[in-house]
Image: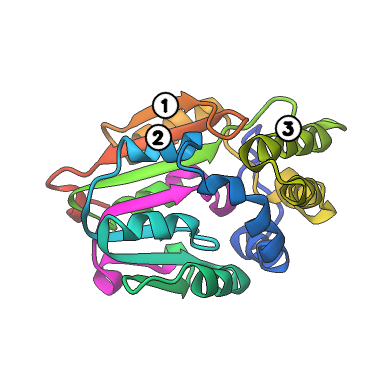
Amino acid sequence: MPMTADGSGSTTTDPPRDTATFFNDFAELYDRFTRGLDAPEHPINRWLAQRLESGRRALDVGCGAGRYSVMLADRFDEVVGVDLAPAMIEIAERDRSRPNIRYEIRDILDMTPEQDGYFDLVLVLSCVMHVGPPGLLLKHLRRLVAEGGMLLLVDTVWQPEWGSPDWQADFAFRTARAAWDATGDLEDVMAALQFVLSPTLCEIAGNISVPSTRDDFLRECSAALPGVTIDDSDLLGVEVFAVCWHAGKAATSEV
């Protein structure tokens, strides 16, 4: 269950599936809205390029339409992309299919090393807040990281202005400007505005997928991933956490 900014629990009974239903309904629009992420010079892509290594197996958690699964496919022998929204997986298979990528409609919390094996890389982009408190997901994901492997994560920090009357509009127009700067395409700008200003997204963002506060995230992340490196960055036009964790020799046997 996700936590509100003050630490109280949401009343939603199944937030990951509620959020997946929303992304399922808006899959094509979301894919258009995020087209700017294709640019190699995008801050997230630069951050990842500085840290990504090559390996045998990679897991893309909350892969959406497969944008980053394709990036991983250039570096890893096998890539597994998982997402709960069938329409997002459909786009991924249609537009971003590769011989070494397997897309699955899966709940990440259902994946286990006994069933799915270990991964040299686990990538998590804008997903933690849709699952719940960071510790819940991170403790689960660390079990999937192979000995000597790595977990990379980028997720949004809760902002004090969120929940105020105009916060969604302010965020929408910042996002639209970022889309314009990235692609210069008016359709991308309109997709950003339409997506972010959707009443359903307002409900999701305001009451279901609520990011952690800085203090909560730092505490839970440090407890779940000993030795983790956490960067405070502005990779998405809003403040985010950028996390890099290397699994030690005993990582795959710890819970």
Tell me which residue sits at (24%, 46%) in the image: 53
Q: Circle 2 sits on which residue? A: 47
| Residue 112 belongs to magenta span | yes
Q: Nearer the viewer, mark 1 or mark 3?
A: 3
Q: Amino acid at mark 3?
A: Arg
Relative to 129, say whether 7 is above or below: above
Please report contact status of discs 1 and 2: CB closer than 8 Å, yes or no: yes
Q: Circle 3 sits on which residue? A: 174
**Residue range of the region highlighted in magenta in the rendering:** 110-135
- The colour mode here is rainbow
Q: Residue furthest left?
A: 249
**Quadrant assignment, res 29:** bottom right
User: Which of pointers 2 and 3 lies earlier in the amino acid sequence?
Assistant: 2
Left or right: where does residue 75 sit relative to residue 1? left
Q: Amino acid at mark 1?
A: Asp
Q: CA distance from mark 1 to mark 2?
A: 10 Å
Q: Amino acid at mark 2?
A: Trp
How many neighbours does mark 2 have within 10 angstroms: few (below 14), some (14-19), or many (20 or more)?
A: some
| Residue 223 appears in view | yes
How many neighbours does mark 1 have within 10 angstroms: few (below 14), some (14-19), or many (20 or more)?
A: few
Left or right: where does residue 34 sit relative to residue 128? right
Q: CA distance from mark 2 to mark 3?
A: 21 Å
**Element type where label 2 sits in the image:** helix
Which x, y percent locates residue 136?
A: 45, 50
Tell me which residue sits at (53%, 69%) in the image: 95
Front residue of this view, candidates 93 and 88: 93
Left or right: where does residue 225 sit relative to residue 35? left
Q: Circle 1 sits on which residue? A: 231
User: Which of pointers 1 and 3 lies earlier in the amino acid sequence?
Assistant: 3
Which x, y percent locates residue 90?
A: 56, 75
Relative to 213, say whether 19 is above or below: below
